Amino acid sequence: MQAYLLWGFVHIVLFVFWLGTDVGALVAASMARNPKRSFEARMSLIRLVMVISVFPRICFALILPVGMHLTKSLSLYPISTDLLLVTWALAAYWIGTVVIVARNEGRRLALIASRLALLSHTILGLIFVVIGLNSLATGAPLEETWFAWKLLLYGLVFWTSIAVEVCFSPFLGPFMEIGQHGSSPEREEAVTRAINNTQIAVVTLYALIAVIAFIGKVKPF
């Protein structure tokens, strides 16, 4: 079997699990915003969101090294062995932060790991955006226009994933207040606003991924 077929298959599987599980988390979060449900039911939905959201984050992390292998096997760019090792190390670090956050929810360790993940997302997003823009402007380091666009949009995915986290973060405070002190219009409005903003960020993320997949498959440029 040719290497590009294997890495292409793994790439597709990661996309499927990433989007499929993320949609499940989005639906559960949307259901949790309904004030007609009991707080216990809403809390169970939020716990479900926390569990499900681990899977798309892991798939997102693995996309990076798998994409590098696919790039090398398609001869789109001469990826060195050292660079492949670096991307696998980054993926391992990234998955480590995901696991730490999931297993230490509400603790200081989870907060530190979450901030490290956001910092790394910011830097990686910047790297891919710069590579994409420079390639479109000068033809280097990537000659293929479609590939430059793909990396540029991939960089935006990192930043959009940060937007998802930022939009969701105001949710937990008023939501836990509902559990402790009961529902109120102000608390419910804050919960709804956080979920609505998160939905906008997530839909934007889906749109970016869809365009990236289209460009990678069709190569319109």
Image: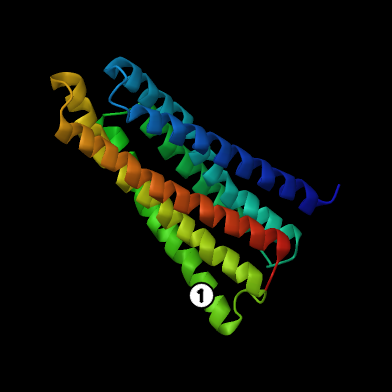
The kind of residue on which mark 1 rests is Leu
State the SS at label 1.
helix
Report the residue that reaches farthest toward the left.
181
Identify the image quadrant of the C terminus: bottom right
Answer yes or no: is residue 86 visible.
Answer: no
Please count the marks in the image: 1
Tell me the crowding category of disc 1: few under 14, some 14 to 19, or many 20 or more residues within 10 angstroms, Cα based.
some
For disc 1, the marked residue is: 133
Q: In which quarter of the image is residue 220?
A: bottom right
Report the residue that reaches farthest toward the right.
1
Answer yes or no: is residue 206 visible.
Answer: yes
Residue 186 higher or lower than 5, as above or below: above
Q: Nearer the viewer, residue 108 or 202?
A: 202
Residue 208 higher or lower than 137, as above or below: above
Instruction: Look at 24% across and 40% down and name the residue there.
Output: 170
Provide residue 85's location: percent of width, then percent of height: 59, 51
Left or right: where 103 falls relative to 157: left
Instruction: Look at 31% across and 34% down and name the residue there.
Output: 110
Residue 217 higher or lower than 199, as above or below: below
Report the residue that reaches farthest toward the bottom.
138
Left or right: where 129 falls relative to 37: right
Provide residue 46's location: percent of width, then percent of height: 36, 26
Q: Nearer the viewer, residue 19 or 106?
A: 19
Q: In which quarter of the image is residue 101?
A: top left
Provide residue 199's location: percent of width, then percent of height: 40, 44
Instruction: Look at 40% across and 60% down and name the residue there.
Output: 123
